[in-house]
Image (cartoon, helix red, strand yellow):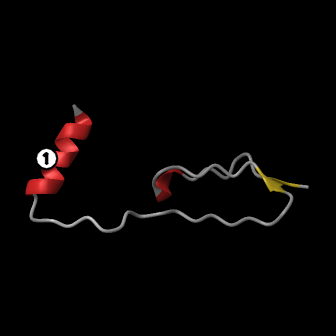
Amino acid sequence: MYETMQKDVLAKSPFVIMFQKVSQVAARPGVTGLEVGPINDLVSYRNIKKQ
């Protein structure tokens, strides 16, 4: 049902969706535990460890 709704909106909408935000995360080798959520407010640094 969601897919059908999306196709309907894309076909009839006055908007053109060309790009979606892509989050790019870079960390040095040996850094683990970085948790990146779907939005900037959901980035967790509490489990970060450097080897």
| Neighbourhood count class around disc 1 (C-alpha, 10 Å): few under 14, some 14–19, many 20 upward | few
Quarter of the rendering occupied by the N terminus: top left
What secondary structure is found at the residue carrying circle 1?
helix
Q: Nearer the viewer, residue 48 or 12?
A: 12
Residue at (67, 53) in percent of width and height: 45
Q: Is residue 8 above or below residue 23?
A: above
Residue at (64, 49) in percent of width and height: 35
Q: Which residue is mark 1?
A: 8
Q: Is residue 3 left or right of residue 44?
A: left
Q: Is residue 8 above or below residue 11?
A: above
Which amino acid type is marked by label 1?
Answer: Asp
Residue at (48, 59) in percent of width and height: 40
Residue 18's spot in the image, x, y percent?
30, 68
Quarter of the rendering occupied by the C terminus: bottom right
Residue 33's spot in the image, x, y percent?
74, 48
Q: Nearer the viewer, residue 24 or 46?
A: 24
Q: Nearer the viewer, residue 31 or 16?
A: 16
